[in-house]
Amino acid sequence: MNKVIDFCRQRQIPYETDASLARCCTFRIGGSASCLIRPRSADEFCDLLVFFRRTEQRFRVIGRGSNLLFSDRHIDF
């Protein structure tokens, strides 16, 4: 996780740790995620994808959150 946070800090990409997933879906339910990253541009998104692949980090893209349900438990992507 520290590698992800360091990467985001270096590139000034917004992120949250222990982030509420309820705020990220239209149903407003769900637990928390260890880290939630919100790239502001396609370039930031592409940089993140390259980083995740090179470092073999697990990740999920959730888009705008429509039609998603998150568990009430903590999710460690």
Image (spheres, helix red, strand yellow):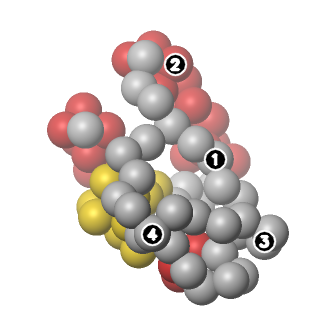
Question: Which label was assigned to residue 43?
Answer: none
Sooner in the amino-acid sequence: mark 1 or mark 3: 1
Q: Position of residue 28 (x, y in %)?
A: 60, 85
Crowd band around label 3 with a 10 angstrom C-alpha radius: few (<14), some (14–19), many (20+): few
Crowd band around label 1 with a 10 angstrom C-alpha radius: few (<14), some (14–19), many (20+): few
Q: Is residue 24 visible?
A: yes
**Residue behind mark 3:** 66
53 in relation to 27, above or below: above
Distance between mark 1 and mark 4 Cα atoms: 18 Å
Amino acid tagged 1? Val
**Residue behind mark 2:** 53
Crowd band around label 2 with a 10 angstrom C-alpha radius: few (<14), some (14–19), many (20+): few
Q: Are marks 4 and 2 in contact (CB under 8 Å)?
A: no
In the figure, residue 74 lies in which quadrant? bottom left
Pick the quarter of the image with the N terminus.
top left
Name the secondary structure under disc 2: helix
Mark closer to the observer (4, 2): 4
**Residue behind mark 1:** 61
Which residue is drawn at the image coordinates 71% and 59% (left, top)? 63
In the figure, residue 69 lies in which quadrant? bottom right
Which residue is drawn at the image coordinates 57% and 64% (left, top)? 70
Mark closer to the observer (1, 4): 4
Name the secondary structure under disc 1: loop
Q: Where is residue 75 in the image (x, y as percent from the top left)?
A: 40, 52
Distance between mark 1 and mark 2 Cα atoms: 13 Å
8 in relation to 40, above or below: above
